[in-house]
Amino acid sequence: MKPKILITDRFAPDALQRLQGDGRFDIVQGGDPFQPPAQHLADAHALLIRSRTRIDAALLARAPQLRVIVTCTSGFDHIDLAATAQRGISVMFTPGANAASAAQLTWALILSCANAIPRADAGLREGGWSRESLVGIELAGRCIGIVGLGRIGSRVARIAQAFGMQVLACDPFIDAAVFHQHDAEAVELDELLQRSHVISFHVPRTAQTRAMLDRARFAQLRPDAILVNTSRGGVFDEADLCHALQHGQLHAAGLDVFSHEPLPPDSPLRRQPGVVLSPHIGAYTEAAFSKASNEAADKLLAFFNTGEIRDRLPPEAAWYPG
């Protein structure tokens, strides 16, 4: 019997064709990515997923033949790695596939906040031509603070230099040579918050990164600061963010990720005028989608060819608490 690969979410056609062309696999697509069909899980040997498919003990119990999971994402908080380890299931991810796209969205949010683009657009569509309330912030000569100088944060740093910004960065897991390479000054988080005009988060969601910003740390921000998060929700308290905006403790925030996704309809963030929102689209470009799908196909083929595991989860990295 051919090994069965269940693809639970969108997958690039060229990557799918490569798997189909191999001829060794029974490949099944479709169904609800939030609830993969039980009849397909029952005899699946491999899963190709994205972040909408949550892997937990209950799902694994319905997949007794499962050997390997590849998630076409750089994040992995949708996978219960303790449960997969208990079952002896190999898990891999595609950490570099969306780096360029996520950095691009980061700058889209920064510029939207700095130039009040959403409010300008809304005003024009309503028939107005008011510029007095749309005075922007010039970024040249100002400081950007980058929390996490990894694959995405380092790209954000390079773009900041093109704007003529000074780069501060906080990352205890990065060598001094990387800070030097990106002309970034290494600082502790509190100093970064106090000095930066723009603060951008690029960290995974772990026990150490949850609620990195609380009400006391929001109070350290400059009143003209812009806060952007395209990494993971939960790295700061959203109620405390709203409080800080309402009390003039920062200028604006650009958010692509949230503590609860989809963002609840009654979230106060939806009614906060100083916030630019997007629905977790940092990896939603055709290029990132194609790269992630093809990297996942490569990993799956290597696994079945030789047993090789590339970009294993849990990550073998100092920043992962284990």
Image (cartoon, rainbow, N blue to C red):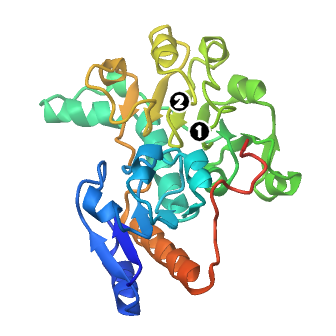
Q: Which residue is mark 2?
A: 234
Question: Is residue 114 rendered to the left or right of residue 10?
Answer: right
In percent of width and height, residue 65 lies at: 45, 66
- Label 2–label 1 contact, CB within 8 A: yes
Disc 1 marks a residue whose amino acid type is Arg
Instruction: Give percent across and percent down for residue 164.
Output: 65, 48
Q: Amino acid at mark 2?
A: Gly
The circle on residue 205 is: 1
- Along the viewing direction, whichever of 157 and 69 lies nearer the viewer: 69
- Frontmost residue, 65 versus 286: 65
Q: Is residue 90 visible?
A: yes
Q: Position of residue 143 (x, y in %)?
A: 68, 36
x 34%, y 37%: residue:
117
Above or below, 33 against 42 in this view is above
Would you call the spot at circle 2 few (<14 residues within 10 Å), some (14-19), or many (20 or more)?
Answer: some
The disc label shown at residue 180, or none: none
Picture coordinates of residue 78 (x, y %)?
A: 47, 46
Q: Is residue 156 left or right of residue 288?
A: right
Q: Earlier in the sequence, mark 2 or mark 1?
A: 1
Measure the alpha-carbon separation of dots 2 and 1.
7 Å
Which quarter of the rendering shows the C terminus?
top right
Q: Can see residue 8?
A: no
Tell me the residue at 40%/59% (across/down): 63
Where is residue 7, by image quadrant? bottom left
Q: Residue at x 57, y 56 (%)?
A: 87
Where is 248 relative to 162, above or below? Answer: above
Q: Secondary structure at mark 2?
A: loop
Please, is residue 222 above or below residue 48 in the view?
Answer: above
